[in-house]
Image (spheres, rainbow, N blue to C red):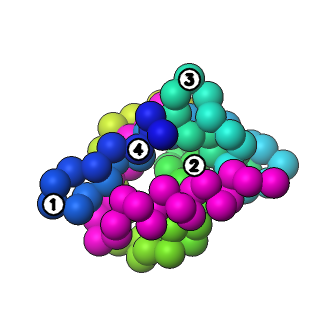
Amino acid sequence: MSFLSSYKDGRTLLSLYIQPKSSANRLAGVHDSRLKLALTAPPVDGKANAAVLTFLASLLGVKRRDLEIRHGAHSRKKTVLIDNKESDEIRQRILSALSP
């Protein structure tokens, strides 16, 4: 999975492509080597960024405070740092959510 990178200290970087103002919050596949998230939130006043963190926390089984948008706070292309979770478990959760 090219959208997932792991550090030796256990942290993981997740590359995302965000589709705001969608009909539902969901994983929508892969777009341009990034995991595509469709979100109902509009891209104004940080609402989409908050929705990204809330959705990922729920999907990955982590606390929201363990997630940080490292790059792309004002862009559809974002990089999120995930602390406190094994990259293998993250990979499994994403694959399970992407499977029909």
Nearest the viewer among 87 and 37 is 87
Mark 2 element type = helix
Residue on which disc 3 sits: 32
Residue at far left of view: 9
Q: Position of residue 43 (x, y in %)?
A: 60, 41
Residue at far top of view: 32
Q: Earlier in the sequence, mark 2 or mark 1?
A: 1
Q: Position of residue 29 (x, y in %)?
A: 68, 40
Q: Which mark is residue 9?
A: 1
Dot 2 amino acid type: Ala
Nearest the viewer among 95 and 68 is 95
Mark 3 element type = loop
Dot 4 amino acid type: Leu
Residue on which disc 2 sits: 48
Q: Position of residue 64 (x, y in %)?
A: 42, 71
Dot 1 amino acid type: Asp
Q: Is residue 6 above or below residue 1?
A: below
Residue on which disc 4 sits: 4
Seen at 33% across and 43% down, the residue is 5
Q: Are marks 2 and 1 in contact (CB under 8 Å)?
A: no
Q: Earlier in the sequence, mark 4 or mark 2?
A: 4
Q: Is residue 48 found left or right of 66 in the rendered image?
A: right
Nearest the viewer among 49 and 85 is 85
Seen at 41% across and 44% down, the residue is 4
Write the start and end of the magenta stretch as one range: 77-100
Q: CA distance from mark 1 to mark 3?
A: 27 Å
In front of the other: label 4 or label 2?
A: 4
For mark 2, does the 10 Å Cα neighbourhood hold few (<14), some (14 to 19), or many (20 or more) residues?
many
